Image: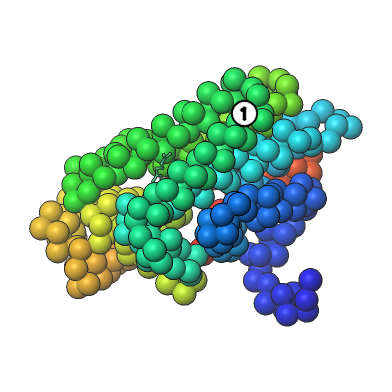
Amino acid sequence: MTSASITTATPLQDDLKAIIAPVKEELAIVETWLTTNLIDDNPFVGELLSQVFQSGGKRIRVAIALLGSKASLTEGRELGRLNIIQAVLTELIHTASLVHDDVLDSAALRRGKETVNKRFNDRLAVLLGDLLFAQASICLARIMNPVVVGIYGQVLGDLCAGEIKQMRSQFNVEVNWEGYINKSIGKTASLFAAGAHAGAILNAAPDSSVQALKDYGVNLGICFQIVDDLLDVTGEATELGKQPGSDLRAGVVTAPALFVLEKDDAAAKRLCELIKTRAIATDEGSLEGISIIKSTGGVEATVNLAGHYANLAKESLSKIAPSDARNSLESLINYVLVRTK
Ligand code: FPP
Ligand code: MG
């Protein structure tokens, strides 16, 4: 590592480094797999694959998969090939879904770089996403465990169902908490849960540990999505690497807006009007929406809601045996809660 990379590391990066320490070596293998082994015979496709995997992703799902696997191992055992493949698989599905998501959102930026759809076109981005899903199927075949195939099959369905729910409720102010949490489970927490507990299945861990890791993943995933939705209101483009305010502009009602809309006051009525009339999709409308949310406690209430799911994730962890990996899973909760990008 160069001295420049040490001096530019932020406190959050330092936190993440400490968190991944128990699986550092395995994480490096996963990284090599994603950035080298996947390179396609076709140089153009190979270049696209490196673009998506070398674009500064945080690899949170890889960390969850490896740490969940390690936390479920019995004393003296080490992580194996199947645990590595499960971590690769989890990141492949995540990346594929983002490539498709950027098409659906017509997004121009992801992690500060031009999206594939912007650089080329939607058709190419859809095909690249499909190619990544195909790579994920090969990983599943290598794992050769029907229960794990079922879990990840469900995840793919949940991702699509979550996105469809979101699409169907754009500019709809009738969204309620149950719908919002269910959508968040579909588009985010389902993959977190699979990542967290599938390794325990491969390690033949006791059912109680498998369930505890699954619950951890669901709760952490919901927490992650709530923070994501909060950052869309409070975040800065330079830090996020994408344009904030895009949820409101697209008429997607998430936690910060829901907290305002559930009240029966002038602020709720105004936000409701901005969404219903689609004025929220304009520069002025979205700025007004953000300002209403910020001035009426929507941000603080959302932080508290994320904290609630963080606590549930922590409680789930208390049901597995103590270990370095479990400690890291616990620290990861705080990382997700205070992240700024
Ligand atoms: C990001 O949401 C998107 C997701 C978490 C999941 C997207 C899933 C799909 C597009 C379906 C995938 C397709 C198959 C075949 C399984 P966001 O737009 O709220 O976040 P962002 O601001 O990072 O884009
Ligand atoms: Mg998006």
Horizontal relation, residue 197 to residue 172: left or right: right
User: Disc 1, ligand 1: is the CB inside 8 Å?
Assistant: no
Residue appearing at x 14%, y 64% in the figure: 279
How was this image coloured? rainbow
Can you give x and y, in whole percent of width and height, for residue 206 in the image?
Answer: 71, 20
Q: Quadrant of residue 72?
A: top right
Does 290 sit above or below residue 214? below
Residue 249 seen by the camera = yes
Q: Nearer the viewer, residue 275 or 296?
A: 275
Give the residue drawn at x 50%, y 45%: 131
The kind of secondary structure element at disc 1 is: helix
Q: How many marks?
A: 1
Dot 1: within a 10 Å radius of its alpha carbon, few (fewer than 14), some, or many (20 or more) residues?
Answer: few
Q: Is 51 rendered above or below residue 331?
A: below
Indicate the position of residue 70 as horizontal and vertical percent values: 75, 37
Please identify the quadrant where the N terminus is shown.
bottom right
Camera-side residue of 47 and 180: 47
Residue at 46% across, 50% down: 128
Q: Is residue 190 above or below residue 129?
A: above
Taking 247 as reference, is 120 left or right? Answer: right
Query: Which residue is the extreme one toward the front?
Result: 42
Q: Residue furthest right?
A: 76
User: What residue is disc 1 on?
Assistant: 141
Q: Is residue 226 visible?
A: no
How far from the left and from the top, in percent, is residue 47? Answer: 56, 61
> In the image, residue 164 lies at what x, y percent?
30, 39
Amino acid carrying mark 1 in the image: Ala
Q: Residue at x 39, y 49 (%)?
A: 126
